[in-house]
Amino acid sequence: MQQLFSTFNQQLNRVSTDFTRYLYNEIHWQNRLIAIIGSRGTGKTTMLLQHIKLNYQPSSGEVLYASLDNLWFSTHSLFDLANDFAKQGGKALYLDEVHNYMGWSREIKNIYDSYPDMKIVFTGSSLLEVYKGEADLSRRAITYHLYGLSFREFLEYEHGIKHDAVSVDDIMMNHPKLAMSIVDEIKPLVAYNEYIRYGYFPYYKEDKELYYIRLLATLNTIIELDLPATEHIDYFSVVKIKKLFAVLAALVPFTPNVSQLSNDIGTTRMSLLNYLYYLDKAQAIMLLSKEAMGIKQMTKPDKVYLGNTNYAFALGGEQTNIGNVRESFFMSQVRVKHAVAFSNVVDFKVLDKYNVEIGGKNKTKKQIAGLDNAFTVLDNIEVGYGNQIPLWLFGLTY
């Protein structure tokens, strides 16, 4: 266990608390069992270490952080760690990447039940479902989902511009005033064009030149390692899922023909729907349906988008279709805090009341004519007027 403490202290010394993710202040850290789910690279590890640094005295021995992909766990069990930790006065266990540990849910349940004075916070892949596995933790764990950087967070992380998150209702009613509050500090269209290319995952700061290489390598790891670990699928399914993603990347956003896609990939309709569901959970793609309450595993989506705009540029470079990027940006930003649904008339139905059509600055109002609560959301404008709203403004919603 000393090895884990040594690794933990080294990581803690390196972590900065200057910038924290949107989710940090939303978590009820006082709960005994907390699950934080998110894609690789969204900042789950950093957030755990930041919370420890801001709230504990690590030298007291009362807190321990450990990543479950550490080689230490190849010869030791998680329950044994908790047992030894408790004997030494340990009170808070922070466990990272639990999906890398076989039987994680059962052992966490046993720790929770056996040590009522011990707090447990764990992170896992966005593919993880806390109610699945060998033990159902859904009645015990409070679960939070972490997405990539919002445009609002990027403004702070990259440019030092801080702004509170706003709701879609706020934007629809007060967008000129909200836009001017940002325009007074920075040229938002310049920052927006940076963000859509490289601002979604915080690790872009480590090396912007090699960001796309790392981005696609991380996605490959999610499909090849995280997906089999959480869904127990075989190698041949992984190959087909990678092929499906490659096909989707060339077509999105589009309304899928499941029969045609099944033939193209060489799989059954049911398997294809499963693969779409897995890629959506992995945050590699976004699925949109007429029902805004989430996509069921056996339900055909009405439209498919890439998971974020950075994927589009990593795959397509400067030949990337900017119209597709606009829709993907809006969807990726708004869906985190608001219900977004497919519409046969406009691009999106938000909160079951707003009709939203996305376009460039010369987009006409023809598409929304005669519709109630209808807005054109436009690229390449700093400040809007009436029911014309700048696209970048919706990046402030989380």
Image: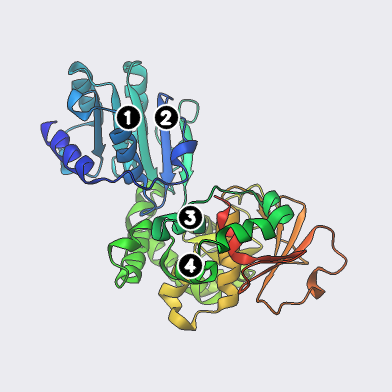
Q: Earlier in the sequence, mark 4 or mark 3?
A: 4
Give the foreground label among 3 and 2: 2
SS assignment at label 1? helix
Mark 1 surroundings within 10 Å by alpha-carbon count, few (fewer than 14), some (14 through 19), many (20 or more):
few
Disc with the residue nearer the chain's start (2 vs 1): 2
Say what amino acid the circle numbered 3 marks.
Answer: Tyr
Quadrant housing residue 73? top left
- Residue 209 marker: none
Residue 220 seen anywhere in this rendered image of the structure? yes
Asked whether disc 2 touches disc 1, contact meaning CB atoms under 8 Å apart, the reply is yes
Mark 4 closeness class: few <14, some 14–19, many ≥20 residues within 10 Å:
some
Look at mark 3 in the image and give the residue it sits on. Answer: 278
Residue at 55% over, 79% down: 321
The numbered mark, 2 or 4, whose residue comes first in the sequence reads 2
The answer to the question of whether label 1 and label 3 lie on touching residues, with beta carbons closer than 8 A, is: no
Identity of the amino acid at label 1? Asn
Q: Which residue is mark 4?
A: 191
Identity of the amino acid at label 4? Ala
Residue that numbered label 1 is attached to: 55
Is 111 placed above or below 376 here? above
Of the numbered discs 3 and 2, the one sitting upstream in the chain is 2
Q: CA distance from mark 4 to mark 3?
A: 32 Å
Nearer the observer, disc 4 or disc 3?
4
| Residue denoted by label 2 | 29
Which residue occupies the extreme front position in the image?
Answer: 184
Q: Is residue 28 above or below residue 157?
A: above
Residue 362 coordinates in the image, percent (x, y): 70, 80
- Cα distance in 3D space between marks 2 and 1: 10 Å
